Image: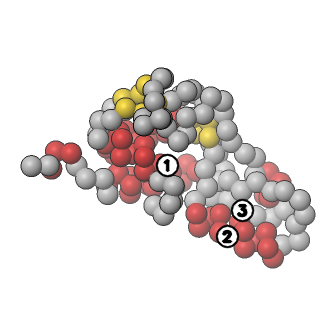
Amino acid sequence: MDDYTRRLHFHVERIAGGEPIGFANMKAEMSFIQATEAALFLKWAGTAVVEGPYNATANGRISLADLIKLIEAPTGKSARISLVGNDEIASPYGIHTSWYMSNEKAVKSGFQFTNLDNWLQPLIEDIASNVPNNNDKY
């Protein structure tokens, strides 16, 4: 909810509003992390004996097609997907190939990440519940 980039909000709001979203590859997969989890990871990395680069991401990944399905459910709308488009409708997740990280090194070093499947759907439902209903307009 507190993502200042509002990338996930972009998708929820556009689908709820019946507006198109441009994607390059709906099969591409992404990984995600919550802001609080990222902060906990940084705190851990600052106090643990670690060296070198580490990736921080929740366990799991999701295809963009499946992400859109998760958004369609609470909005009650079918997404209008465009595989071409301009910058106005381009998804901030409009990647051509999968873009995810492995958190294996951090896990082996002792950090425990959340599972994406446990929090992504409730987060989307929370965002969707805060989107004004277009049917409520006078």
Percent of width and height locating residue 4:
50, 60
Three-letter residue code for mark 1: Arg
Dot 2 falls on a residue whose secondary structure is: helix
**Residue beneath label 3, please?**
112
**Residue beneath label 1, please?**
7
User: Alpha-carbon neighbours of circle 2 within 10 Å: few (<14), some, or many (≥20)?
Assistant: some
Contact (Cβ within 8 Å) of mark 1 with mark 3: no
Q: Quadrant of residue 12?
A: top left
Dot 1 falls on a residue whose secondary structure is: helix
Q: Please identify, in this view, whether the residue under mark 1 or under mark 2 is nearer the observer.
A: 1
**Residue beneath label 2, please?**
40
Three-letter residue code for mark 3: Gln
Q: Quadrant of residue 86?
A: top left
Three-letter residue code for mark 2: Leu
User: Alpha-carbon neighbours of circle 3 within 10 Å: few (<14), some, or many (≥20)?
Assistant: some
* Residue beneath the point at 83% across and 73% down: 48
> Could you say which disc has been placed on residue 86 in the image?
none
Percent of width and height locating residue 78:
33, 32
User: Alpha-carbon neighbours of circle 1 within 10 Å: few (<14), some, or many (≥20)?
Assistant: few
**Protein image colouring:** secondary structure
